[in-house]
């Protein structure tokens, strides 16, 4: 058994990537992910890899594009506003069918938002946030241990299907320290096969390779998109990962990922102590989403409670899975730093008993806004302050 | 009969889609000849831009990657750092390099990336139909400057070579022209040097080639060449703006 050490999430992630054979990193400073490039700046050199501090996230993602095209395990990391800038590059890499790893240690948004943890980039991550019809793997760790383990998993999935992979975590996970161990053998990149599609290097022994995302001939693009769709379908069928806790007898099912799942486990225990049978399904892959399993469980439970640090972005996927088989509620904590177990416990009870406490309710919110907005002549602001 | 010239082996059999007289065709051939002469076909990588040269990847018979508008130098950085034995060149137009991709080219030069950049300055956005570029001359008509570029509204053209030459880590910067046989011979010499530098580990090497876009200038190729000689060179003087090749080689 590997030695247990205390490690910060971002550093565990960086070391986990190195041990997964990552030998290229490009990034740009942004809180709360700064420890990743800082760690990589010396660790890549030690490991014989390359580190570049790029002039922007736009540049970093394109450096990744170039490096990934050579077949090395390559990675970039950033936080929410930086991910917005990376979308063009991610779209190109999806279009060029390149494996790579992109990390988002999410912070509050929109705009500059704040630097606390958040989960507001769920939709952007799971729908392929750039232009065009594409997806990326999205892995959602919920502990420092998983931050260390997921880079390897992400590279393997990404290479198997030639689909970019993303690790979607949040500022709390990135910043927190926890006991963990590196429980897999470090990957020696020399033992990895050089992919047949890779460019660069010295090669007398193969025909030239081309990496590109365009298809301008008639019908060509459609063919490329459909081919990719086949792989996406296979991924949705075969690569779903999730964890269940106490779902056998659950009357309320919580669906939560990442740090929200941590708080939900504590809330579940409070609810059980109060006589409410709560269970948890934690999606680990957000794309592909565990829709099938959630649909099965929705027929057994009385209600589902989505807990997320965003305004129901994940709930959309739960709704699509459940198809009205049972009521689906939302406990939302956007940009609030941390979901609170006691509040979630109340939300669990509300979900079961048809109450409103700690649940997001569109009608109530609209009423609140209506009273403010229609009460004055200028509907958006009064004396310069947003209502 | 003896052949006195032949198609460079670093060009594929694909037929160029460039308009008659276009500078891209000339420069493609020069780059291919250089790749042949330096015998680097099996380690060269072309980074194709967004612009009329988007299909450079179809024409050069070497490994290739086509990237987002303006990001060539960042992509080239990624390739070169990951596979230092590659000979990487980014081929870019003036909208691509001097407008949307200005940050990428400046910082690749500032970092002193050991890459080669071929910059085609035709004073206009060719592919999208003749819009104003950062390099458009004052008074020159473009589809987004129908009365000619107005200094007061749109400022003055950017002289990229002069600008990059200010950066300490840029090692070789030259501006050449594709308008005449003597100038084309000089252009080839410059391109060859920019590749040789990479082989020698010298560092960032950049060749700006003045070219014509008869189609979007709305002139015949011959009139276009006249414009290049009379107007463009006045704004964009030819010559070497920086050459630390020798100093660097001795320093190694
Ligand atoms: C992000 C983005 N913005 C705009 C475009 C549209 N676009 C295609 S080519 C081009 C201009 C290319 O001009 P230049 O770099 O001067 O090359 P030329 O065609 O003259 O060789 C533009 C703006 C694009 N493809 N992507
Ligand atoms: S539009 Fe201009 S730059 Fe483009 S191929 Fe034609 S002449 Fe060349």
Image: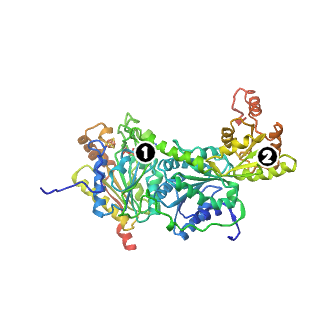
The secondary structure type at the circle numbered 1 is loop
- Residue B187 location in percent, x, y? 28, 56
Q: Chain of mark 1?
A: A
Q: Are marks 1 and 2 in contact (CB under 8 Å)?
A: no
The secondary structure type at the circle numbered 2 is loop
Q: Which mark is residue A202?
A: none
Q: How many labels were placed on the picture?
A: 2
Residue that badge 1 annotates: A214
Residue that badge 2 annotates: A250
Q: Examine the rendering and report whether any part of residue A102 can be seen.
A: yes
Which quarter shows the N terminus of chain A? bottom right
- Distance from label 1 to label 2 (Cα)? 49 Å
Residue A45 placement, left or right of A9 = left
- Residue A216 location in percent, x, y? 40, 41
- Say above or below: B14 vs A381: below
Q: Residue at x 46, y 51 (%)?
A: B71
């Amino acid at each position: 058994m590997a030695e247990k050490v205390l490690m910060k999430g971002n550093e565990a992630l960086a070391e986990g990537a190195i041990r997964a054979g990552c030998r290229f990193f490009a990034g740009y400073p942004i809180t709360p992910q700064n420890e990743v490039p800082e760690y990589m700046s010396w660790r890549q050199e030690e490991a014989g890899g390359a580190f570049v501090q790029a002039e922007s996230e736009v540049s970093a993602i394109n450096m990744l594009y170039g490096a990934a095209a050579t077949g090395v395990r390559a990675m970039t990391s950033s936080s929410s506003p930086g991910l917005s800038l990376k979308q063009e590059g991610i779209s190109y890499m999806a279009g060029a069918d390149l494996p790579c790893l992109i990390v988002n240690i999410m912070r509050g948004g929109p705009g500059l938002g704040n630097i606390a943890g958040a989960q507001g980039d769920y939709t952007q991550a799971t729908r392929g946030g750039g232009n065009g019809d594409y997806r990326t793997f999205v892995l959602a760790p919920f502990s420092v241990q998983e931050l260390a383990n997921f880079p390897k998993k992400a590279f393997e999935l990404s290479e198997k299907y030639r689909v970019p992979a993303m690790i979607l975590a949040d500022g709390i996970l990135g910043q927190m320290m926890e006991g963990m161990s590196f429980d897999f053998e470090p990957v020696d990149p020399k033992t990895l096969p050089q992919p047949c599609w890779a460019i660069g290097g010295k090669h007398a022994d193969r025909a030239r390779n081309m990496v590109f995302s365009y298809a301008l001939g008639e019908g060509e693009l459609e063919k490329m998109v459909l081919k990719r769709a086949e792989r996406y379908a296979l991924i949705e069928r075969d690569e779903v990962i999730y964890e269940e806790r106490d779902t056998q007898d659950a009357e309320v099912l919580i669906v939560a990922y990442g740090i929200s799942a941590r708080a939900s486990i504590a809330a579940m225990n409070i609810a059980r102590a109060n006589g409410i049978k709560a269970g948890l399904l934690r999606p680990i892959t957000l794309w592909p989403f565990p829709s099938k399993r959630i649909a099965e469980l929705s027929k057994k439970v009385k209600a589902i409670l989505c807990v997320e640090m965003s305004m129901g972005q994940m709930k959309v996927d739960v709704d699509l899975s459940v198809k009205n088989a049972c009521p689906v509620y939302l406990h939302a904590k956007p940009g609030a730093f941390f979901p609170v177990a006691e509040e979630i416990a109340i939300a669990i009870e509300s979900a079961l008993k048809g109450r409103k406490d700690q649940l997001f309710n569109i009608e109530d919110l609209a009423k609140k806004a209506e009273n403010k907005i229609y009460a004055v002549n200028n509907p958006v602001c009064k004396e310069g302050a947003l209502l | 009969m003896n052949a006195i010239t032949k198609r460079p082996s670093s060009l594929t059999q694909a037929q160029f889609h460039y308009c008659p007289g276009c500078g891209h065709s000339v420069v493609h051939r020069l780059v291919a000849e250089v790749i042949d002469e330096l015998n680097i076909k099996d380690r060269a990588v072309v980074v194709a831009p967004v612009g009329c040269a988007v299909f450079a990847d179809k024409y050069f018979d070497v490994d290739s990657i086509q990237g987002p508008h303006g990001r060539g130098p960042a992509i080239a950085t990624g390739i070169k750092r990951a596979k230092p034995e590659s000979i990487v060149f980014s081929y870019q137009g003036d909208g691509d390099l001097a407008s949307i991709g200005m940050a990428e080219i400046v910082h690749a030069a500032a970092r002193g990336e050991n890459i080669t950049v071929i910059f085609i300055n035709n004073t206009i956005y060719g592919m999208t139909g003749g819009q104003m570029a950062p390099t458009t001359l004052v008074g020159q008509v473009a589809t987004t400057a129908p009365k000619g570029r107005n200094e007061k509204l749109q400022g003055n053209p950017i002289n990229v070579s002069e600008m990059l030459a200010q950066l300490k880590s840029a090692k070789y910067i030259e501006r050449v022209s594709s308008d005449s046989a003597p100038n084309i011979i000089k252009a080839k010499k410059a391109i060859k040097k920019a590749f040789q530098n990479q082989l020698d580990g010298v560092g960032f090497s950049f060749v700006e080639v003045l070219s014509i876009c008869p189609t979007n200038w709305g002139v015949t190729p011959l009139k276009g060449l006249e414009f290049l000689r009379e107007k463009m060179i006045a704004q964009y003087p030819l010559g070497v703006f920086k050459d630390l090749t020798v100093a660097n080689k001795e320093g190694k």
